[in-house]
Image (spheres, rainbow, N blue to C red):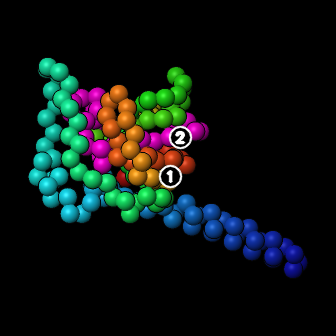
Amino acid sequence: MKHKILLYLAIISSALVNTASAESSLAIEWLDLIPEQERAAYLSNASIQISHVGPQAKQNAAGSIREDLDGADISIAGFVIPLEGTESNVTEFLLVPFFGACIHVPPPPPNQIIYVKFDEGAPVTKLWDVVYVTGELTTESQDTDLATTGYLLSAKKVDEYRE
C-alpha cells in the first residue's frame, strides 16, 4: 500500500513539474520586443503602407532589440512566412506580427521579425492562421532574401492560436 501511495505521489509530482515548465515561458506581445524608450516613436509611425506598385520598399532598420530577452523562454503569437522545409512541414520560418508582412511591402523593422527554427517541423496546413510559438529567444540577427530579423527563436512547439 505504501508503494502505491509513493508511486501515486511521484506521478503527481512529475505532472506538476511538467505543467510548471510548460507554463514557465514568458508570454509576450510584439510591442514587448521593442525597447521601452523606443515604443512611443514606433507607435507614432505604425501605419503600414502596403503597395504592389514599383520596386520593393526597403526595410526600415530603425529600432533596436531588447538584449535582456536574450536566452528567455518565450511564447508569442504571429503569422508564418515559410523559408525551409518540405511540402508538408516547415522547419524554418519568419514569424511576423501581421498577415502579409515581408510579402507585401515594406517589411517591418528587424525588432518586429523573428527567425524561427523548428526541427520537428510545423504542418504546412496551419501556416495561414495565427500560431503560438514557444521556445528560447536569442538576440541573434538573421539576414534573409525577404528581410533582416532582430531575433532568433529555437522553437520547442508551434500551436494553433486560441483566444
Residue occupying the point 37% across, 35% down: 143
- Disc marking residue 120: none
Q: Identify the residue at horizontal 51%, vertical 47% (top origin).
A: 154
Residue located farthest toward the bottom when viewing the structure as drawn? 2
Q: Is residue 46 left or right of residue 124?
A: left
Q: Between residues 1 and 159, which one lies in front from this camera angle?
A: 159
**Above or below, comparing residue 161 to residue 129 in the picture:** below
Q: Is residue 78 visible?
A: no
- Looking at the rendered structure, the number of numbered marks drawn on it comes to 2
Q: Amino acid at mark 2?
A: Phe
Query: Is 69 on the left-hand or right-hand side of 117?
Result: left
Q: Amino acid at mark 1?
A: Gly
Residue behind mark 2? 118
> Quick one: label 1 or label 2, which is nearer the N terminus?
2
Task: State yes or no: discs 1 and 2 in contact (Cβ < 8 Å).
Answer: yes
* Range of magenta residues: 99-123
Residue, x 84% and y 73% (percent of image)? Answer: 4
The percent position of residue 53, horizontal first and vertical second, equals: 14, 20
Q: Residues within 10 Å of mark 2 (few under 14, many from 20)?
A: many
Q: Quadrant of residue 55?
A: top left
Label 2 secondary element: strand
The residue that disc 1 covers is 135
Quadrant the N terminus occupies:
bottom right
Q: Residues within 10 Å of mark 1 (few under 14, many from 20)?
A: many
Tell me residue 131's x, y (percent). 42, 43
The residue under the point 30% across, 48% down is 111
**Residue 110 belongs to the span the image colors magenta:** yes
- Give the image location of residue 148, x and y in percent: 33, 38
